[in-house]
Image: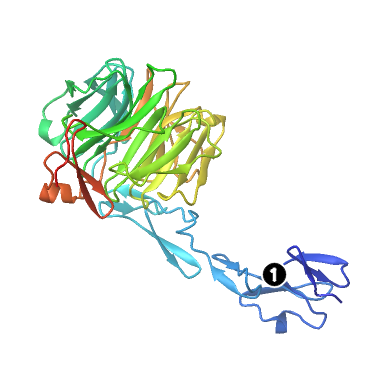
Amino acid sequence: MSDGRNKGFTMIQFCTRCLKIGIISDTASNCTVGGCEQTCTDLKDGGYVCHSIRGFRISPNNPKICNDIDECAEFTHNCSQLCTNLNGTHACSCREGFVAEINGVCRLEQGAITLIYSDSPEIRAFNLTSHTAKYVIKGDNIESLDYEPVSGIVYWTDSYGKTIKRSYLPGSPERANVTMGYAQNLDIESHAKPTGMAVDWAGLNLYWSETDRTGNKPRGSILVSTLDGRYRHSIITTGLEVPTSVVVDPDHGYMFWIDIGSIPKIETSWMDGSKRRILVSDAISQPTGLSIDFTMEHTIYWVDVKLNKIEMMREDGTRRTLVAYGNYLKHPLSLDVFESSIYWVTRDSGEIYSMDKFGRGVPVKLPGEFANPSSIKDKWYNTSSMSLCQRDTPCSHLCLIVPGGYKCVCPDNKLLYL
């Protein structure tokens, strides 16, 4: 008998049968004396094979030993929010303000979920409990939007006027009796068209991307200002062509954006524009929407409108996972994530769909008539984050959150004196 190994196989009984590594072969051996840590199967022609039970896998270093699988690290846990790895299993739990249902899904403890979405020249609010939508803000050529939860203000890009506007959301604490919001222009007009935007609710800053098509080749940039549009500062000005979406994570100090130029990619940097690097550049074609699931370890989700894909990954770019793929997604244009669901806007049919955020089940169309939705956000945010920028107000103009602290920067036409 030969016990030589060749390319991941163990040779048994003079090479008349090949089995994958993990087989312990000996004509005198069986499971009784094999020494498998968990389960074992005797082979008909002699020898045995070790197996692992659910929650474990055979060690690559010793086919008799079983190692615990960290489901929390591998996106195989299906927990709505928090996951704790245990020996051979894992446990799900919910963050403060949420309660666990029988199926383990975390639901908002109080209040109804409201989706805010742009619908042609209007901004509407959709109540997911009553399945009713109402027209809340009148705008013009709304391309993207975001929500500032502390003051209850919606911000949006006006692609026709090439500017950014904002309005109180009717029913917010500061405007409880107001039924309609009206636009305030932040007066940041330029020759470039604003495309994506994100509100830093902890540092109280506004981030946006824009594309200048006046030259032979599109030139993209990412800028930041205070929430009222003052102290405009350019943070990404090179190596960017057509940015379509930008999101920020004030809890960790990171920014993420999409570029669908000649080389489509997803990039990240600190929120001051430093430490820039590419996270995704392969197997993407036309990514158009980004979202951060703050309740599930700040997981990044994105849609690819051309490939009909929804994917997710960790903030460092690891654990890239396909969530959903196929024509049934109807070319997702933008998305947001809340509780255990993804919500996205379709490009061609102009509809809004939801689906389990791990890709289980089938998409469900939200009831209602939608004219031309292009951007969607859920109204709930964790507003408990308090940055050094809010506590100490150390900077004369702009205070930008970075990992572990902050950085003072000046508007584009001023210099910083230390």
Q: Nearer the viewer, residue 243 or 140?
A: 243
Identify the residue shown where x is 51% and y is 47%: 321
Q: Nearer the viewer, residue 261 or 171?
A: 261
**Which element carries disc 1, helix, strand or loop?**
loop
Vertical position of residue 238 compared to residue 75: above or below: above
Q: Which residue is mark 1?
A: 22
In percent of width and height, residue 385 lies at 21, 50
Q: Nearer the viewer, residue 60 or 331?
A: 60
At label 1, the amino acid type is Gly
Look at the image and tell me in which quarter the N terminus lies. bottom right
Way the structure is coloured: rainbow
Q: Nearer the viewer, residue 234 or 140?
A: 234
Count of marks, rendered view? 1
In percent of width and height, residue 341 lies at 40, 42
In percent of width and height, residue 259 lies at 43, 32
Asked whether residue 337 appears in the rendered view, the answer is no
In percent of width and height, residue 207 lies at 27, 34
Vertical position of residue 45 compared to residue 411: above or below: below
Asked whether residue 48 appears in the rendered view, the answer is yes
Identify the residue shown where x is 53% and y is 43%: 322
Which quarter of the figure has residue 415? top left
Left or right of 103 on screen, residue 396: left
Which quarter of the figure has residue 39? bottom right
Left or right of 12 on screen, residue 382: left
Q: Residues within 10 Å of mark 1 (few under 14, many from 20)?
A: many
Vertical position of residue 164 compared to residue 90: above or below: above
